[in-house]
Amino acid sequence: MITQLTKEYKEEYLELVNEFYHSEAVLHPVPFQYMEATYQEAVNNSPYVGCYLYLVDQMPVGYMLLSYSFSAEAGGKVVWLEELYIKKQYRGQGIGHQFLKYLNDEVVKDKARVRLEVEPDNERALKLYKSQEFEILPYIQMIKDYQDE
């Protein structure tokens, strides 16, 4: 079952996020305070963040974190699939597909594009996204962080 993140699942969500940021799916971990800040945005109905949990027997075993923006290139609103994480023991059971179906059926209604990032050697994630007709863009992504200044 997929449900929106609520305050009752704070500890379980933060545990999942911490696992994600210490996995092979990311280049480097992020400070724990960033995870907590994201949680606060998500549970306080931020217009910029959406977070969904996948529950098995009322326990979260995965999550999908979204952020929202506007893109001139896309001609409208964009959903960024920021993070999609499923505990190892639950992978290969179709949960990723269910998250993406939920994204398509429930979230993307008035949006022009869904965009995501994936590590090039995360073959399992690439296979999932390609099976859902996501295309690889030939862009070089760049960032400039202001958090640490």
Image: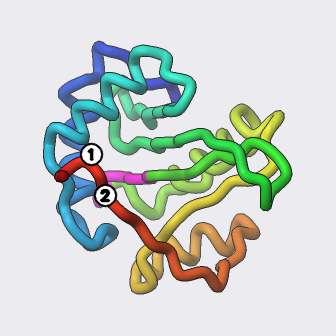
Q: CA distance from mark 2 to mark 1?
A: 20 Å
Q: Position of residue 80 (x, y in %)?
A: 58, 50
Residue occupying the point 36% across, 63% down: 144
Position of 46 compared to 28: left or right? right
Q: How many marks?
A: 2
Name the secondary structure under disc 1. Answer: helix
Q: Nearer the viewer, mark 2 or mark 1?
A: 2
Q: Which residue is mark 2?
A: 145
Q: Residue furthest front?
A: 149
Q: Position of residue 54 (x, y in %)?
A: 45, 36
Position of 46 compared to 57: left or right? right
Does the magenta segment cover residue 85? yes
Does the magenta segment cover residue 116? no
Magenta stretch, residue numbers: 83-89
Query: Quick check: 138 above or below 130?
Result: below
| Quadrant hosting residue 23 | bottom left
Given residues 47 and 61, the one toward you in this image is: 47
Query: Quick check: 131 above or below 94?
Result: below
Q: Position of residue 127 (x, y in %)?
A: 57, 77
Q: Which residue is mark 1?
A: 17
